[in-house]
């Protein structure tokens, strides 16, 4: 994806959950997804809240999951989401973390990198 095709990119019909405990990052990603047409974007700062949202809203089509959260490590939730066949993109500020279960985006990430993975 390049700057020419990014303007044509659409997230129409996508319902996303952002699991991120840094409010500014969560707001930036939420605004980006909405800007590109995501139909619904929910955010959670904790694993417990993310699980509640996933239980209450079966319409989540993708999860952007930070692995290091205030109430624990997102790896357990990642395994649950993969088992439930929910697409996940792991977001982390820890360069070098690899994940066999999902794509990894290192923060801070560019708009292009995030949209390419979605």
Image: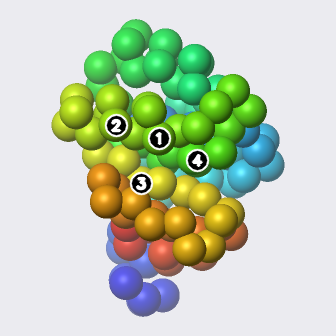
Quadrant into which the N terminus falls: bottom left
Residue that mark 2 sits on = 79
Residue that mark 1 sits on = 75
Q: Mark 3 against mark 2, which lies toward the viewer?
A: 2
**Pointers 3 and 2 in contact (C-beta within 8 Å):** no
**Pointers 2 and 1 in contact (C-beta within 8 Å):** yes
What SS does tag 1 mark? helix
Residue that mark 3 sits on = 89
Toward the viewer: 76 or 54? 76
What SS does tag 3 mark? strand
Q: Quadrant of residue 28?
A: bottom right
What SS does tag 4 mark? strand
Residue at figure coordinates x 53%, y 66% from the top left: 97
Residue that mark 4 sits on = 66
**Gap in angstroms between the C-alphas marked 4 and 3:** 9 Å
**Gap in angstroms between the C-alphas marked 1 and 3:** 12 Å
């Amino acid at each position: 994806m390049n700057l020419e095709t990014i303007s044509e990119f659409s997230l129409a019909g996508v319902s996303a959950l952002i699991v991120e405990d840094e409010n500014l990052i969560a707001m930036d990603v939420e605004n980006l997804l909405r800007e590109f047409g995501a139909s619904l974007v929910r955010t959670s700062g904790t694993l417990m809240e993310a699980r509640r949202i996933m239980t209450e809203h079966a319409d989540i089509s993708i999860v952007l999951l930070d692995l290091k959260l205030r109430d624990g490590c997102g790896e357990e939730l990642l395994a649950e989401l993969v088992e439930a066949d929910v697409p996940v993109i792991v977001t982390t500020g820890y360069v070098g973390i690899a994940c066999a279960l999902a794509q990894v985006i290192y923060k801070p990430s560019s708009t292009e990198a995030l949209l390419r993975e979605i």
